């Protein structure tokens, strides 16, 4: 005999589409009754396989589950169950490993860690916590021979990351991300400007605040009229002029293509900054001397956390459009499914 079943299919001409299937039922000689199997319909499901695959494809976009459910004419619970069927395992480590944290606000903690292969440009895994205990447990479970093949470990200026690299990746060169040590100089000259602004008249203080980008921008990239304005601003104080000179010198070191020259000038810059008499740059020089070995590795090998920061930005967009995802496993699956 036959039974009628209503099943959901892909939207047709921007409208929800439901199919009425006339299912054939058989009677076995043993008395058991069973339905005919269909290639387009999974067992015990009320939606077609291609609708499920379309839902999986839409989950790659940076949109909320509610938006996917509205597009496919499914409930948010159904879309969530489909997402939970997707599984990603951690691939083998490559030559380089990049690590960073992002504010995920999942149930496992405020911050989560992201592991990226900066050479092949894909996310390897998302970790529920950034604490040193959790990171040690995670890397300890990875095969030792696989960890010993890693040649580069890229991170920011956070000591627990460096300790993890030395403990579990002994053959890897630790590299500090370029952005994190360059911004130390940017912060130093900004703090010098803010300190001097407190001693200025109100009108002049507002002018320096509005024109602070002229001091931060590379002097060679300024137009001729902006160079004159910048020179006039720097004549106000010797500390500001000296800070601008140190900033330009450090940027010049970063852009030098020869590592041997970079290494010599980097240590000369530290010596000059330590004796310049500007407390902001003295603090910056102390930081650079502490991290000198790893900063020089950044000059030598040229690897950065740029691709990792790009993935972090996409994760933040995904979290924002979803109004937060508290379930970490679901959050991890969504990130790996969307970014890889």
Image (cartoon, helix red, strand yellow):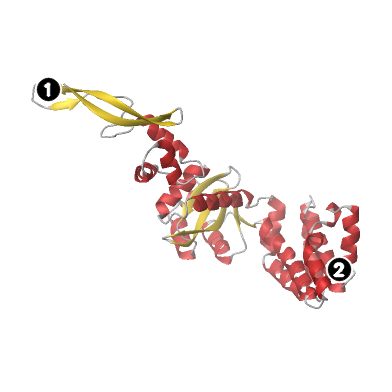
Q: Residue at x 62, y 52 (%)?
A: 305
**How far apart are labels 1 and 2 at the CA level?**
94 Å
SS at mark 1?
A: loop
Nearest to N terminus: mark 1 or mark 2: 1
Q: Position of residue 207 (x, y in %)?
A: 82, 67
Q: Is 267 drawn above or below residue 274 in the view shown?
A: above
- Quadrant of residue 26 within the rendered picture: top left
Q: Nearer the viewer, residue 226 or 88?
A: 226
- Quadrant of residue 228 within the rendered picture: bottom right
Q: Which residue is mark 1?
A: 28
Q: Residue at x 77, y 77 (%)?
A: 198
Q: Residue at x 48, y 45 (%)?
A: 336
SS at mark 2?
A: helix
**Mark 1–mark 2 CB contact (< 8 Å):** no
- Marks counted in the figure total 2
Q: Nearer the viewer, residue 336 or 35?
A: 35
Q: Position of residue 298 (x, y in %)?
A: 68, 55
Q: Is residue 156 visible?
A: yes
Which quadrant is the N terminus positioned in?
top left
Q: Nearer the viewer, residue 296 or 13?
A: 13
Q: Is residue 150 visible?
A: no
Q: Which residue is mark 2?
A: 241
Q: Residues within 10 Å of mark 1 (few under 14, many from 20)?
A: few
Q: Is 76 drawn above or below residue 158 in the view shown?
A: above
Q: Position of residue 40 (x, y in %)?
A: 33, 26
């Amino acid at each position: 005999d036959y039974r009628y079943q209503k099943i959901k299919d892909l939207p047709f001409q921007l409208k929800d589409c439901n199919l009425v299937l006339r299912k054939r039922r058989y009677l076995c000689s043993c008395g058991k009754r069973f339905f005919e199997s269909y290639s387009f319909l999974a067992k015990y499901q009320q939606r077609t396989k291609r609708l499920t695959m379309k839902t999986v494809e839409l989950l790659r976009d940076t949109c909320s589950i509610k938006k996917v459910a509205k597009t496919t004419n499914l409930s948010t619970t159904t879309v969530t169950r489909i997402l939970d069927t997707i599984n990603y395992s951690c691939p083998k480590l490559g030559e380089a490993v990049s690590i960073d944290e992002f504010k995920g606000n999942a149930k496992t903690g405020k911050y989560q860690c992201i592991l990226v292969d900066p050479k092949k440009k894909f996310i390897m895994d998302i970790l529920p916590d950034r604490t040193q205990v959790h990171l040690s447990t995670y890397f300890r479970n990875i095969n030792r021979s696989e960890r010993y093949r890693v040649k580069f470990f890229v991170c920011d200026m956070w000591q627990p990351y460096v300790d993890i690299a030395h403990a579990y990746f002994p053959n890897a060169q630790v590299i500090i991300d370029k952005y994190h040590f360059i911004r130390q100089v940017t912060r130093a000259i900004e703090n010098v400007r803010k300190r001097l602004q407190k001693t200025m008249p109100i009108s002049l203080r507002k002018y320096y605040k509005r024109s602070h980008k002229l001091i931060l921008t590379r002097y060679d990239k300024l137009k001729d009229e902006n160079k004159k304005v910048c020179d006039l601003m720097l004549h106000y104080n010797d500390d500001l002029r000296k800070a601008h000179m140190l900033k330009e010198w450090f940027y010049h070191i970063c852009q030098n293509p020869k590592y041997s020259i970079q290494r010599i000038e980097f240590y000369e810059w530290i010596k000059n900054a330590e004796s310049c008499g500007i407390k902001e740059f003295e603090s910056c020089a102390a930081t650079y001397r502490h991290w000198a070995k790893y900063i020089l590795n950044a000059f030598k090998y040229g690897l950065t956390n740029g691709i990792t920061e790009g993935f972090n930005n996409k994760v933040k967009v995904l979290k924002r459009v979803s109004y937060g995802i508290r379930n970490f496993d679901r959050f991890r699956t969504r990130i790996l499914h969307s970014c890889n």
